[in-house]
Amino acid sequence: MEKKYYIIITPFFPSETSFRGPFIYDQVKALQKCTDYDIVVFKPCSHASYNRGIRSSRFRDIPILYFPAKWTPSYIFNGFYNNHNSDEFIRSLESNHINIHDIAIIHCHTSSLGACGIKAKEINPNITVLLQHHDKDPFGILNGKLASWKFNARYRAKKNIDIFNKVDCHICISETVKANLLSFPAASPQETYKPYLQRMTLMKGLKPIKPKRVEVLYNGVDTEKFYKTEVNRESIFTIGCIGNFVSLKRQKDLLVALGNLYQRRKITDFRILFVGSGPMLKTCINLSHSYGIDQYCEFIQEMHHQQLKDFYNNLDLFVLPTEFEGFGCVCTEAAACGVPFIIPDNQGAAEYLPLTEKELWTYKAGDTEQLANLILRYYTTPTVQTYTFPLDITILIKKFIDNLTQDKSLAYNI
């Protein structure tokens, strides 16, 4: 019996010039370890690139095949080109000599690319189409300059509703993502992010989705890349934070918390390492000056992914003060390196913490006083952080695939 194909369609995959999408690469590597499928990665590209002859590339040991796609600027009427892009994907399968009847699974990342999997399933009904959601906004109603325009927002949502009802299985990277997916056209009762709640008011009257199946698959860690090492480091208490400097990441909350500890508790034997860039960077730098803690802060705009293991191993504590995070891979990467993390509640990575430990490591997003108290507690009395789920991505992927293949309601050839 010939091998069956497991096709991954994603806009996120690393290259030699950009490491955007490392989790998808780790996922592919885990799938290779756990299954006998012939795994093939497809990535959309512009027609101009495709016409210049860019049809394939390679990142390390993983080949990447391209198909030409069209997108509207700033997500205006996102989904308008779904049929066009799906046809291009089918043509790319043919040009790469992949028989569509030899495909068992098509695993799509982002809602628009889910349409490509559905198009293939119309030709071969035995294909199982998976759609993975990486964001607490699974319907994509927040992004874009005209996202608040009601007609545009509802158009985009309706396009996604149609796709979501047709795929065989939704993969959510956390329970909090799943909750927002299934609560539509309302937000999850636990959701507190105001821009999302405001945007959901435009969705009133739309029909909820009727998914065939929804699974949670946490973003695990490649434990061959992230693990605890013995390093010679300074004794000073060191906190790390990684993330784009945008408003929802709320790095300013961490600076306020540390500023208060410095001014009120006179704590001076600490340092904080921020990694990232973005529009809020200058604001955060200025804030560190206003609290008088700029000498304890270091802002690192870029860091190669291969340097992260050493970065984590030089920390005492990792803090991600975000308020709208589907998961937060940086938290579990830190954990795999033996470094505990603090994160607001109702964020994906918080689900890794046992209920008995929630009050030690989570707080209400934006509550800088509570965040300062959590940091102070660990600073004065370090404790071991424990986890409810495995960190190893290979273990998580294997369990997911085993559950998927045991479901007789899905395609017979999985």
Image: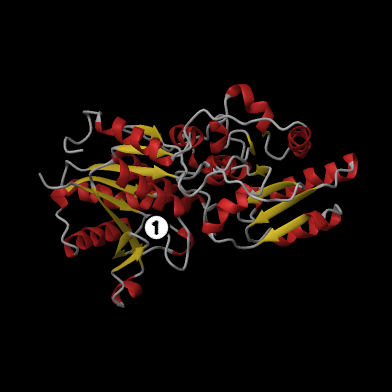
Q: Nearer the viewer, residue 257 or 121?
A: 257
| Residue drawn at the location 30% of the way across and 40% of the way down | 34
Q: Which residue is mark 1?
A: 11
> Position of 102 compared to 205: left or right?
left
> Position of 148 compared to 80: left or right?
right
Q: Is residue 345 above or below residue 3?
A: above
> Position of 364 compared to 40: left or right?
right
Q: Is residue 21 above or below residue 175?
A: below
Asked which quadrant contains residue 213, the reply is top left
Q: Is residue 210 visible?
A: no
Q: Is residue 20 visible?
A: yes
Q: Position of residue 369 (x, y in %)?
A: 79, 36
Q: Position of residue 244 (x, y in %)?
A: 61, 56
Q: Nearer the viewer, residue 259 or 211?
A: 259
Q: Position of residue 33 (x, y in %)?
A: 31, 44
- Quadrant including the N terminus: top left
| Residue drawn at the location 76% of the way across and 59% of the way down | 285
- Quadrant including the C terminus: top left
Q: Nearer the viewer, residue 289 or 187?
A: 289
Give the SS element for disc 1.
loop
